[in-house]
Amino acid sequence: MMLAEWREAFGAHNPNHLHTAVSQAMQACKFWPSIAEIMEPLRSIRREAVATLETISGSGRWVADGSKQDFCRDGRTEAEEIAHRKAMCEKWRDDAAALKTPNETGI
């Protein structure tokens, strides 16, 4: 039963990151670390890896520095990005409405 819980919690993680996180948790704990005690360093390792990949690839995410460039994608201005997102939402709504039968829409 314990192995199933560990496999469920850690099965999708990178083995190198997991090894580092378990090593850090074992050094910090007096007894065998729990899943929660391993997840904490694992999350920070994963955040660092994602930040490194984004730096290398040049694809940034929203950063709370107030820069409007972080909000926009594909070189669009802020107004263009808002218009693009609005158009995409309308397209998705239209696509979803087209999938419904007359009984589901109430028409």
Image (tube, helix red, strand yellow):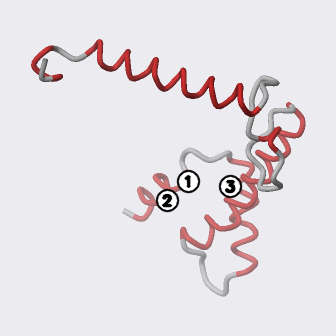
Q: Secondary structure at mark 3?
A: helix
Q: Earlier in the sequence, mark 3 or mark 1?
A: 1
- Vertical order, 42 against 103 (above or below): below
Q: For residue 6, which numbered disc appears in the image?
A: 2
Determine the residue located farthest toward the front in the rendered image.
79
Q: Is residue 3 left or right of residue 105?
A: right
State how far apart marks 2 and 1 are (Cα): 6 Å
- Element under disc 1: helix
| 59 or 98, nearer to the observer | 98
Tell me the quarter of the picture where residue 94 sits.
Answer: top left
Query: Would you say the residues marked 3 and 2 are in contact, meaning their CB atoms lie under 8 Å apart?
Result: no
Image quadrant of residue 42?
Answer: bottom right
First in residue order: circle 3 vs circle 2: 2
**What distance separates the C-alpha of mark 3 from that of mark 2?**
11 Å
Q: Residue at x 62, y 23 (%)?
A: 84
Classify residue 36 as left or right of residue 92: right
What's the residue type where badge 2 is placed?
Trp
Picture coordinates of residue 85 (x, y %)? 59, 28
- Residue type beneath disc 1: Phe
Q: Position of residue 101 (x, y in %)?
A: 17, 14
Q: Would you call the spot at circle 3 few (<14 residues within 10 Å), some (14-19), or many (20 or more)?
A: many
Q: Dot 1 surroundings within 10 Å: few (below 14), some, or many (20 or more)?
A: some
Q: Which mark is residue 64?
A: none
Type of amino acid under label 3:
Leu
Is 45 left, or right, of 58 in this rendering? Answer: left
Disc 3: which residue: 18
Q: Residues within 10 Å of mark 2 (few under 14, many from 20)?
A: few
Which labelled disc corresponds to residue 10?
1
Q: Nearer the viewer, residue 20 or 59?
A: 59
For the N terminus, give its image quadrant. Answer: bottom left
Residue at horizontal 27 percent and vertical 14 percent from the top = 99
Labelled pair 3, 1 in contact (Cβ < 8 Å): yes
